[in-house]
Amino acid sequence: MLKINNLSKTYIKANKEALKDVNIHINKGEFTALLGQNGAGKTTLINILAGNVKKTQGEVEIGGYDLERNELETKKIIGIVPQEISYETAFTVEEILKKQSGYFGIKNNKEYIDELLESLALQDKKKAYGRELSGGMKRRMLIAKALVHKPQILILDEPTAGVDIELRHTLYQFLRKLHKSGTTIILTTHYIEEAEKLCERVIVINHGEIIADQPKDKLLKDFSREIRIEIDFDWEVNIDAFDFLKEYHPKVEDKKRISLKIDKNDLTKILDMITQKNMKFVDLNIERQKLEDIYLQLIRR
Amino acid sequence: MNKSLIFYNRIGFLTLLHREIHRFMKVYVQTILAPLLSSVLYLGIFGGMLQTREVGIEGVNYLYFLVPGLATMAAILSAFQNPAFSIIVQKFQNTVQDLNSYPISDIEKALAFILGGTFRGLLVGSLTYLATTFFVGHVIQYPLLFVLSLTITSFIFASIGLITGLLLDSFEKMNFVLALIITPLTYVGGVFFEITKLPGVLSKIRYINPIYPLVNITRYTYLGVYEGNLQLQLLAATIFIIGFFLAAVYIFKKGYGIKID
């Protein structure tokens, strides 16, 4: 659905290399998170897809169309929700969405516009001007605007920045529904938890380079070598009794519970060592690493 | 063929054109009534003051001389302001990049902005003429040619307005162009006086002033009388139409002001 090959971008004026030989292939229907710090190159990448920024090198193919040779066809395939809230001050929500449909060659789109406004809880703001909307409503209007032409790929650039928790969850629900209906979604976000909850695939970009691109589960699995385990015993524990596990930094968490930080491959070995000491344990809790921890590990490398 | 130069999306083009007209119609007090009022004031003040002086074409009532000049000036200013203002507002609102996301070719986009401005110029120019009929009555010689002349004038200045909007990034800069280039050129372009009656260098400016032939052609369609060489002025107008339009399309295609290098 989206093929990016050897894409590079150097901003001429600022003499800044924003993207270095980026390769990304995204399949139809995938829900991908694009993670990276501020200035990592996420927005540059999106702006190239949107046609706002001219690429320096490489090829981009959107829905089978080359971005350079068939630029106009590629526009119909993507919908972009920009990072910054911006809207036409002269027109109402309904006028903006009607015009947006027209720009994409759709003459009468009233039904779909109403449907979008309904699912984004904006139906009673149809006649309102942008300035009369709250921050969250403006965000939702931008999402509706990006969707009026039913794009096959929806790209959201930090859509939940500064959005309250309730609205964030409404948006999650909406995106899940959209994903189910077959839309390919690319989401950039600073809330890693969001990527963990929603996305199937994670791409991490750092200093303009892709440093990770994997299915989320595989990334979590591969990177979760270090795990934290908690072991419950049926007797009150004493830290001195766990001297034999010193290299795993045992900590007493509760009267009958200790925690250890271990390599997951050592789990059996550790449990064996405990059993050999005739220490009977009653419960075992394994905490895997969160995407956030992995993300931090990756960008600190 | 290059995709930016074809007609690709008719509905998209018409929507963008409609947007350009819808936008100024929403604020018609500023965009239509205000220039009309200033034209009528010009007619009252200049017309009244200068009627007895010989500043117009000999043998022609000065008020009649003035009407086509005012209509042309109103058309020029309105046509220029529409796309220039529209693009700069979009830059200010941060929505100008949206233009890059539409499946509309560059020539369609440029034409939509230019025709939006042309429509406003023609509307304000024609209404100026109608308003003046209350004072001077109907004396128009070739009504259809008059409308055509205002259309051509508006098209040229809408193209210049679009170029200005794309190249500049603030209202201050746009006002600079308007106040220090366009408006002075209308004053030495034959709106109020017969150019050859202006002293020295002010009279010579007509050779490089695109407003001069346009005012003259409009005046001819209104009065049936003209100054200078009409054929040469028609040739100049044709060159302006093609030249400024192509320049506007080129600037759109290059992405000045809306795409980042």
Image: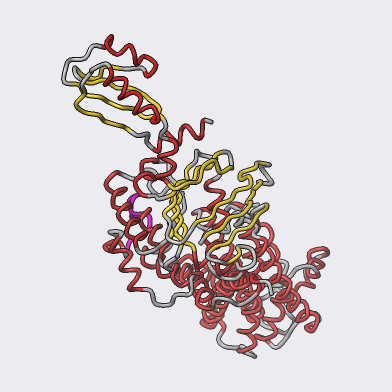
- Of A264 and B100, nearer the camera is A264
User: Residue shown at 32%/17% (left/top)?
Assistant: A250
Say above or below: A252 vs A27.
Answer: above
User: Residue shown at 36%/29% (left/top)?
Assistant: A227
Left or right, B159 with respect to A192, comes to: right
User: Residue shown at 70%/84% (left/top)?
Assistant: B220
**Residue B175: image location, x then y, percent:** 60, 56
Left or right, B31 with respect to B197, comes to: left
Say above or below: A199 vs A108.
Answer: above
Say above or below: B1 vs B133.
Answer: above
According to the image, what is the colour scheme of the structure? secondary structure
Left or right, B110 with respect to A215, comes to: right
**Residue A212: image location, x then y, percent:** 51, 42
Instruction: Please report the bounds of the magenta region as a residue range.
Output: A127-137
User: Residue shown at 44%/49% (left/top)?
Assistant: A201
Q: Is residue B150 magenta?
A: no
- Of B58 and A235, nearer the camera is A235
Q: Quarter of the image containing the N terminus of chain B?
A: bottom right
Q: Say whether residue B202 is visible.
A: yes
Which quadrant holds residue A100? Answer: bottom left
**Residue A200: image location, x then y, percent:** 40, 50
Which quadrant holds residue A14? Answer: top right
Tally of numbered discs: 0
- Of B88 and A214, nearer the camera is A214
**Residue A151: image location, x then y, percent:** 45, 65
Say above or below: A192 vs B158.
Answer: above
Left or right, B146 with respect to A104, comes to: right
- Of B36 and B42, nearer the camera is B36
Q: Say whether residue B75 is visible.
A: no
In the picture as drawn, the residue positioned furthest to the front comes out as A276
